[in-house]
Amino acid sequence: MKWISKNKKPLIVVIIIMVVIAGILDIKYEGLFFQILPESIQTYLADFFK
């Protein structure tokens, strides 16, 4: 736990990068987050990632 308290900034950056990558993959493979979006946005994103 001492390592986490000393290195909060790099840990937060890694977590943010992982969330962004997960979001991009969710949109690319039309996952749960993608299905929640309105249909007009879904169409735009589906065309953008194809």
Image (spheres, rainbow, N blue to C red):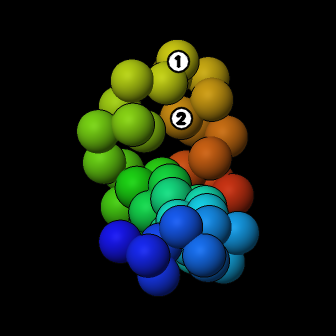
Please tell me which residue is depicted at 30% across the width and 48% down the height of the picture.
Answer: 31
Q: CA distance from mark 1 to mark 2?
A: 6 Å
Q: Which mark is residue 2?
A: none
Please tell me which residue is depicted at 52% across the width and 18% down the height of the picture.
Answer: 38
| Residue 6 image position (x, y, % from top left) | 60, 76
Whether 18 is drawn above or below 39: the answer is below
Please tell me which residue is depicted at 44% across the width and 63% down the height of the picture.
Answer: 22
Whether 50 is drawn above or below 42: the answer is below
Toward the viewer: 6 or 30? 6
What's under tag 1, amino acid-wise? Answer: Pro
Q: Residues within 10 Å of mark 2 (few under 14, many from 20)?
A: some
Quadrant of the rendering where the C terminus is positioned = bottom right
Circle 1/circle 2 CB separation < 8 Å: yes
Which residue is labeled 2 in the image? 42
Q: Residues within 10 Å of mark 1 (few under 14, many from 20)?
A: few
Please tell me which residue is depicted at 42% across the width and 39% down the height of the picture.
Answer: 34
What's under tag 2, amino acid-wise? Answer: Gln
Which residue is labeled 1 in the image? 38
